[in-house]
Image (cartoon, rainbow, N blue to C red):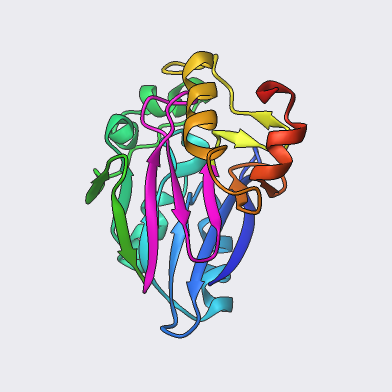
């Protein structure tokens, strides 16, 4: 697996492309904005996009979804309790910043413990509510990499003061789904630099 990253949009959301170099296929995670930049990343990798994975449904993570979906023809995956974010601007919060982001419903709804076989790669779905009700992480055990969205950041955690957020739930999600993994697992968050389970276990002030 080779992973590409592109910062997109006003909030510098991390959009990722996980690539199976043998099959020349890839998976996009969180196309938040700047469709052209995302498609340039895909072109650079020279792969076919097999799926679009959403860690959650906030507007800064789905802003380019409709365009990227149309350009790639790839199916969309999202957690059960965030599926309404795709169709309702008031739920994805775009309405409150003067935008009107509406997408078609996801082709696939994921749940805790689901195992997705995409582009010859395996991703385990881990439900991690707290930032949103339906937030999920996608874990590739083979490469010890997890796409964590806005659940946890380098030495911080996701906001819990937005609708559907819960400080208690996000701490439970991190401690029960992420910190139980090996220290060497790389965490790829929705904003900011990558980190690791071990680093957050030792250095994240919210988790001490």
Q: Is residue 122 left or right of residue 192?
A: left
Image coords of residue 24 (percent x, y): 44, 82
What's the residue at 53%, 51% (across, down)? 146
Q: Is residue 113 left or right of residue 17?
A: left
What's the residue at 22%, 51% (across, down)? 107
In the image shown, does 161 or 181 lie closer to the viewer? 181
Q: Quadrant of residue 174?
A: top right
Looking at the image, residue 129 lies above or below residue 163:
below
| Residue 131 magenta-highlighted | yes
What's the residue at 56%, 53% (across, down)? 15
Q: Magenta stretch: give its range.
A: 120-148
How many circles with numbers are drawn on the protein? 0
What's the residue at 60%, 65% (across, down)? 4
Q: Residue furthest bottom?
A: 22
| Residue 39 magenta-highlighted | no
Q: Quadrant of residue 202?
A: top right
Looking at the image, residue 179 lies above or below residue 193:
above
Image coords of residue 56 (percent x, y): 42, 37
Image coords of residue 142 (percent x, y): 49, 66
Image coords of residue 116 (percent x, y): 31, 58
Q: Is residue 107 left or right of residue 153?
A: left
The C terminus - image quarter = top right
Q: Is residue 203 left or right of residue 114?
A: right
Looking at the image, residue 49 lies above or below residue 140:
below
């Amino acid at each position: 697996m080779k992973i590409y990253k592109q910062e997109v949009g006003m909030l510098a959301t991390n959009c990722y492309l996980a690539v199976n170099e043998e099959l020349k296929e890839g998976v996009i995670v969180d196309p938040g904005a700047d469709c052209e930049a995302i498609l340039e990343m895909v072109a650079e990798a020279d792969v076919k996009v097999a799926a679009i994975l959403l860690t959650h449904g906030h507007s800064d993570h789905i802003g380019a979804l409709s365009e990227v979906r149309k350009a790639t023809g790839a199916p969309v995956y999202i957690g059960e309790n965030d599926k309404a974010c795709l169709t309702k601007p008031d739920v994805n919060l775009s309405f409150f910043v003067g935008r009107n982001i509406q997408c078609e419903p996801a082709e696939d709804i994921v749940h805790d413990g689901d195992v997705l076989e995409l582009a010859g790669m395996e991703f385990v779905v881990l439900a991690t509510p707290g930032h949103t009700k339906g937030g999920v992480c996608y874990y590739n055990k083979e490469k010890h990499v997890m796409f964590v969205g806005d659940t946890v950041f380098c030495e911080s955690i996701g906001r819990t003061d937005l609708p559907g957020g819960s400080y208690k739930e996000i701490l439970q999600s991190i401690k029960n789904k992420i910190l139980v993994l090996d220290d060497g697992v790389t965490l790829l968050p929705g904003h900011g630099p990558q980190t690791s389970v071990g680093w957050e276990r030792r250095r994240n002030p919210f988790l001490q």
